[in-house]
Amino acid sequence: MKKMMKLFAASALSLALMLSLFACAEAPEEKKAEAPATQSEATTEASGEASPDASGEAAPAEEKTVKVGFVYVSPVGDAGYSYAHDLGRKAVEALDFVTTSYVESVPEGADSERVIRNMARKDFDIIFTTSFGYMDPTIKVAKEFPGVRFMHCSGFKKSENVNNYFGRIYQARYLTGLVAGAMTKSNRLGYVAAFPIPEVIRGINAFTLGVRQSNPEAEVRVVWTKTWYDPALEKDAAKSLLDAGCDVIAQHQDSPAPQEAAQEAGAYSVGYNSDMSSFAPRAHLTSAMWNWAPMYVKTVEQVRDGSWQGDQALWWSMQDGVVDIAPMGPMVPEDVKAQVLAKRDELMSGVDTVFAGPIKNQQGEIAVPEGTSMTDGEMLGMTWFVEGVVGSAE
Amino acid sequence: MALKIRKRDEPWKWGALVIFLGALLFSLGVSCLLLAGQGKDALHGMFILWEGSFGNLWALEGALLKAIPLFLCSLGVAVAFRMQIWNIGAEGQFALGAIGATWMALSFPGLPWYGLMPLMFAMAFLLGGAWAFIPAVLKLKLRVNEIISTLMLNYIAILLLDYLVFGVWKDPTSFGFPMTPEFTSGAVIAGIGSSRVHWGLLFCAVVGVGLWAFMRFTRLGFELKASGEGARVARYAKIRYGLLTMFVMGLSGGFAGWAGCIETSAVLNRLQPSLMVGYGYTAIVVAWLARLEPLNIAFGAFLLAALRVGVENLQLELQIPAAFGVIMEGMILLTVLAGQFFLTYRIERAPREGGE
Amino acid sequence: MLMWEFIIPLMAAAVQSGTPILYATLGEMMTEKGGVLNLGVEGIMAVAALAAFVTSFATGSPWLAFLAGGTAGLAFASLHAFVCITCLGNQVVSGLALTILGLGVSTFLGVPYVGLAAPGFDPFAFPLLSSIPVLGDIFFRQDMLVYISFVIPFFFWFFFRRTSLGLHVAATGEMPAAAAAAGLKPVALRYFAVLTGGFLIGLGGAYLSLAYTHLWTNGLSGGRGWIAVALVIFAFWRPGRAVIGAYLFGGVMAFQLRLQAMGTHIPSSLLLMLPYLLTILVLILSAWRGRRIDAPAALGTNIEPEA
């Protein structure tokens, strides 16, 4: 018996060895076969104006000249934040001179550093690191690979070959606030929020400013879940707000569960990340949405043309097409729609007055005096709530 | 044909290894099927996995780095498991160790490394140990099940870490993001030579050998092993079970605390919530795969770390979902467990009933 | 009357968020009564939640989906049964492995279903009973699966007190050797306990994707499986106390969220600790009062086959 087992193990081992050798031999062929298949002839619409002249001067069209990598913090299947980035990646992938690849569910910290470094070693031309926690690792790796370009999302550090970038989602938040403020009857709105970091706090503040613009009496109540992603807990949080008398639920969470809770209670909801109307058609007023595709495409084109520059802090706005709101639901009255769209046109034209004074803080003290506006730096580091928010910013 | 189960008269000498390899092969086989199910070339996938785990120096370096905290946590878990105390709380003890180290690093930023490091390691051990001490006391005095108490303390520890970095320890220059200020150079464990691998590796080796020697040559170590064999044996040998439990849990938590200290200091250079990636839970897997032996744990930690690193390569090259690696891990563990049956038992053909 | 306005919705929320935990707790209790510790609850719930969602999505029948969740739980728990009962693997480690595997499998296979919506169960006012003041508002304006969960503890109690099968299962959990000597088949009984338990845990998972929310996402179980394991001990292996425990836990979670919604200034990290602190505290208090802990005597030990 014992002998038999040993024999079996030995033969299994040698079999495995053989198989892996076989795999080695086969690997290159596999890659060759793949390349022509994924290639698309047509220049896609997404690439915009830059592509026609580019296709003329760039190397033969079959050549994939730019290799683009993405690092995500959660699975792309989460329908939330990483999913939005991955839609951007797909738009880039559709360009005929680009290959892309991504690694998902990469924990921030040591693991991300290794993943980023691994990408840099594999001759990626540009690497998008899409979570705040990747900031230090990105800077560290960038120092070792001066020839590779890096784009870090949502942080504040930059260097020779690192840009940080983000979108002014607060502009969209402000617009959704305008809608929500006009629709509330109880003058109490709820906001299910993930973590008390500036990005989220800024969103809550912009939303509240919008709400109070259309309804100076209204207040916004905040519940922290301390998770980006726990549908059941998010729904609980939304319910607790509904029970507290809120009749519009907004969210800075990745799952549509708060939308469901609002619809079940007969209240309204404001979505985030993408158009969430399909989850709660009767409740959904609008959503604050990400659309990374245009700027990702533009960035990759810059890499190809050699016009990409490092050491920049890029904060893309509605004008760049990176943020927007979803079409407003049928329950929103026409005059409100018109008002919101007018403000949207203003933002589209590049006039941003969301955080223009006078703005009071929670204690009622003037935080931004009249005639001044918050600087980008102040907005990036926002840790206090504006007047009208009820809850702790911690 | 009827089969019959018989207990082995003597332990199967190479059994553990054979079973482990067999289970590994089985799991790899199923993984191949999963890959094929995704429409990928399974063999090519396995090759990429291999290349990403062991194929080059960087991969090995990455795996080694990842193995360090895993090894220490696992060592701690193994010490407790040996006494049949189910410490599931390495994750929380790891967090407390990180908190302890950070506390010292932030309080005495001016000290040189030879002054600061001992403080950090001592406080990490103390807090990690104390966190494990709570369930030990609860178990002894009130018979509160340690699986539950250690598990609940994990959640609490992580929230405590959150509270600190979101509140009192937040770096004023971090634009409000949850992280402590960067440690001063005296609080950072340096890399060995020009490599990425840091001196924590040496520390691991010392701790591992120390523990082995302790178990082998001291009376306490002997008692510990004996009480793991069973309560009756322990009573026979007049072992102070209560004292031993507290000692073992303290040690177990302390090791996990050290892991937290090293990870914070050498890798992150500051405390932030992203420190917590589940090493404490993976450590349990490692400890068990390694049959609680320090040397095996070193191998096991490295192997599992390599697997995780390799799966990243698989993702990058073939766009396989990250959950693939998790499935492999779970499957290897389950099959090894199932296979251990053959260590103590063997299956034989039963004699025909007529022949009896 | 402001108090009632706060308390009634709170209690109703406690019942709802306690329900998936209740199913899982009863399932784990069943398993442990047979002498097998199953730490794989979290993984089983995740797999069952996915199975239920996929079934509901494909067939449009929530009831079929609910059963599918239970069946998936049973099937997944059978892995644990095989490893522990047949192969004599360590129960603690096998359970952990099951959790790892379950979370991995559900995330891996669930990718195409993320972001879709499927039919499920919605709350409705139970005829007559919902008009009872206070109690009606708390207990009888829920969904169908909550009502089902009300009856299971009674069945559970009846099963272990009044049926011979129940007594036999409990006997293998207490003294498998003696049970075998009395002519019972401990191995078969343990399989029965683990599989039925897995079915119940699966129902808890199905609740998450059918009633609690109507969508599938990875990480839907969100730690509830671990809470269930804790509550079994809290409940001293008694179904009635499991109900209290599950609602208490759901209640504390709902309470801290409501406290935030009221506009408190306590940091959220500290509030979120409450449920976990409470679990430990309750365990301590029940031990303090010198309650006898009725753990099945052979819990966690495997049955050695006769050589």
Image (cartoon, rainbow, N blue to C red):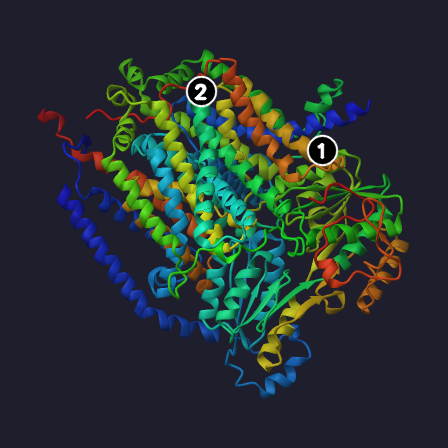
Question: Is residue C145 in view from this perspective?
Answer: no
Residue located 27% across and 36% down the image? B215
Q: Which of A158 and A150 is in front in this view?
A: A158
Mark 2 residue crowding within 10 angstroms, few (<14) / some (14–19) / many (20+): few
Q: Residue furthest top?
A: C162
Q: Give the x, y percent position of residue A264.
A: 73, 38
Say above or below: B99 vs A275.
above
Residue located 29% across and 25% down the image? C303
Q: From the image, state whether disc 1 or disc 2 is nearer to you.
A: 2
Disc 2 is placed on an element classified as: helix
Q: Say what amino acid the circle numbered 2 marks.
A: Lys
CB of mark 1 within 8 Å of CB of mark 2?
no
Q: Give the x, y percent position of residue C296.
A: 40, 19
Q: Distance between the residues labelled 1 and 2?
A: 34 Å
Q: Name the residue under label 2.
A: B141
Q: Residue furthest bottom?
A: A57
Say above or below: B339 vs B237.
below
Q: Give the x, y percent position of residue A349.
A: 82, 69
Mark 1 residue crowding within 10 angstroms, few (<14) / some (14–19) / many (20+): some
Q: Which mark is residue C259?
A: 1
Residue located 21% across and 34% down the image? B344
Same subunit, tags 1 and 2 = no
Q: Nearer the viewer, residue B114 or A51?
A: B114
Question: Is residue A242 in view from this perspective?
Answer: yes
- Residue B348 placement, left or right of A351: left
